[in-house]
Amino acid sequence: MLGSVTIFHSTVVSSPFTVNSVRLDLGLSRLWRQICSFAYTLWLFTFSDLKTVFFPTALPAAHRTLAHFRDCRRPHVLHLANHPRVIWIWLHLLQFCLSNQCLSPEEDASNKPWRPIPSGRITVANARSLRWAMLAVCLSVSAHYGVLAPSVALALGTLAHNELGMDAAWLPRNMCNAVGYAAFNAGATYVAYAGGEHKAMAVAAQVLNALVIVSTIQAQDFQDTEGDRLTGRKTLPIVFPRSSRWAMPVLLAMWSAFLVAYWHAPVVHGAVLSAMGALGGARFVLYDNAAADRKSYRLYNLWLCAVHVTPFIAGR
């Protein structure tokens, strides 16, 4: 009896169907882990730029979506302005980050060693192949949603900023950043204004946002002066170390006052915008080290988010 049980048990265990099922489960589990690891690698490429590009660009879009939800007169706009917009922003951000980080692994090893290339999660060659594959993905997605022109502008701006080396000097660097932000804003807001509603306001907002960026985006460079010196960049904090700091509170205060007046912003929003600009600008003058500059830059990005939503809150 015991022998028959043993034979039966061994027969069940050695069944080809059972063995194949175990192999399939192991294969699927391994595949899932690889997919999750790859997705996490892509996320790491964009992580440090979420606060600088993704959220400042997505916030005005979210505000318009809520406005249309309350309005309910254009439900098709509400549907289109939801998740595709967020995906569009992130895909184009990934394209830029891949291009940028392929060219500066030494700088990232010094400033951000957790990024995928210096941490060994992906090779430079594979990241470069992925960068050009993402160009095709971004153009295809943009053509599908009718925002091909901003995507092309972003592709050209990325090429100029990174591969053509225009980020080496502060003026073309700031101009490329302005073009990039304007293209991000144009692509992110296009669907909400596809019907022509407030289109003039959207264009004015994009132009003003670009001017804000070209004159203040050096805020991102104070924290990276060591890495920029290693790569030979001539950013404003390197060329004009003191005057560039003193310019920050002046520029943020002037832009805050102008935008509040131009958009006829509510008093509370105007006060918040001005206070954030004053605090962030003052920190660049009062504190002069990389750790403090990183905190100041976070405040600058909060101020930038407030700048981007100002026209939509004011509804000029």
Image: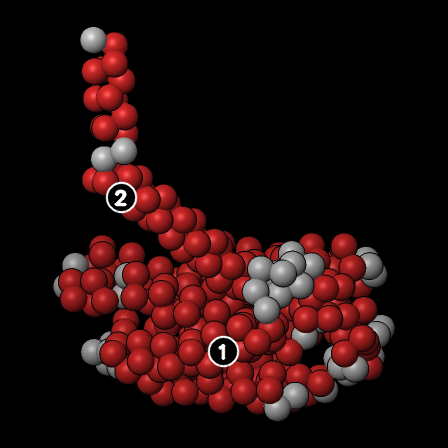
Q: Dividing the image into 4 quarters, which one contains the C terminus?
A: bottom left
Which residue does the image show at 20% across and 8% down from the upper left?
1
Mark 1, residue position = 129
Mark 2, residue position = 20
Which residue does the image show at 49% across and 89% down from the upper left?
156
Q: Badge 1 local density, few (<14 within 10 Å), some, or many (20+)?
A: few
Measured as percent of width and height from the top left, residue 293 is found at 74, 60
In front here: 305 or 220? 220
Amino acid at dot 1: Ser
In the rendered image, is residue 117 in sight? Answer: yes
Q: Residue furthest top?
A: 1
Which residue does the image show at 16% across and 66% down from the upper left?
76
Q: Quadrant of residue 195?
A: bottom left
Which residue does the image show at 38% across and 77% down from the upper left?
138
Q: In whole angstroms, how far apart are the C-alphas of marks 1 and 2? A: 36 Å
In front here: 64 or 258? 64
Measured as percent of width and height from the top left, residue 159 is found at 54, 87
Q: Badge 2 local density, few (<14 within 10 Å), some, or many (20+)?
A: few
In the visual, does 208 lie left or right of 315? Answer: right
The mark that comes first in sequence, 1 or 2, is 2
Measured as percent of width and height from the top left, residue 168 is found at 71, 85
Q: What is the secondary structure assignment of the residue under circle 1?
A: helix
Q: Quadrant of residue 122?
A: bottom right
In the visual, does 130 lie left or right of 253? Answer: left
Model colouring: secondary structure
